[in-house]
Image (spheres, helix red, strand yellow):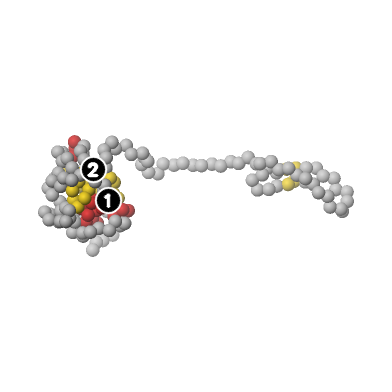
Amino acid sequence: MTTTAATLAPANQTVDVQSHVPVTANVTLQVGAMTETVNVTASSGDLIETDPVDHTDIDRGLFEKIPLESVSSSVSSLVTMASPGVSADSNGLFHGMGDHASNSFSVDGQPITDQQSKVFSNQIPLDSVQSLEVIPGAPPAEFGGKTSLVIVATTRSGLGNPQPHGE
């Protein structure tokens, strides 16, 4: 007689059948050996942040979730809403760590040290931005002498987009 059950090892027992009268046969099943295979593959970058500079990363997934207060200066509004230590005044100008005069933008590696707000100039449209990195405090030397806030913007490439579109 062979007895099987899910997740248990099968048990074999020899029985001698000589009658039509039912007989109880006690069977002890052992826990079967389980084999589980887990495959781990690397599909993205490191999970541990290796950048020693304090910063806030803002990606396109967050753009849709944050209610922006201004369409004409949506980048400033996004930086204000998503970055700790950044506040806006009544004119919509953002102030990093309390100092509005030492802010700088870097768009695809090109530094823009002039004021970027709806009062002084136009900003790049939010639809053209892929991600933002907001560096408060004392930014690294490659961003120059700005001491308050650097916004590093990476624009969208359009690669893999077979049909141009816009509004």
Task: State the residue position of label 2.
Answer: 135
The residue that appears at 64% across and 45% down in the rendered structure is 7
The residue that appears at 11% across and 54% down in the rendered structure is 120
- Residue 122 shows in the view: no
For marks 2 and 1 on the same chain, the one whose residue lies earlier in the sequence: 1
Q: Is residue 108 left or right of residue 32?
A: left
Splitting the image into 4 quarters, where does residue 15 fall?
Answer: top right
| Residue 82: percent from left, percent from top | 27, 51
User: What amino acid type is highlighted by mark number 1?
Assistant: Ala
Splitting the image into 4 quarters, where does residue 26 fall?
Answer: top right
Q: Which of the numbered marks, if any, corresponds to residue 123?
A: none
| Residue 94: percent from left, percent from top | 18, 51
The residue that appears at 25% across and 58% down in the rendered structure is 68
Q: Secondary structure at mark 1?
A: helix
The residue that appears at 23% across and 59% down in the rendered structure is 69
Q: Which of the numbered marks, if any, corresponds to residue 82?
A: 1
Specify the farthest residue to the bottom.
167
| Residue 128: percent from left, percent from top | 23, 54
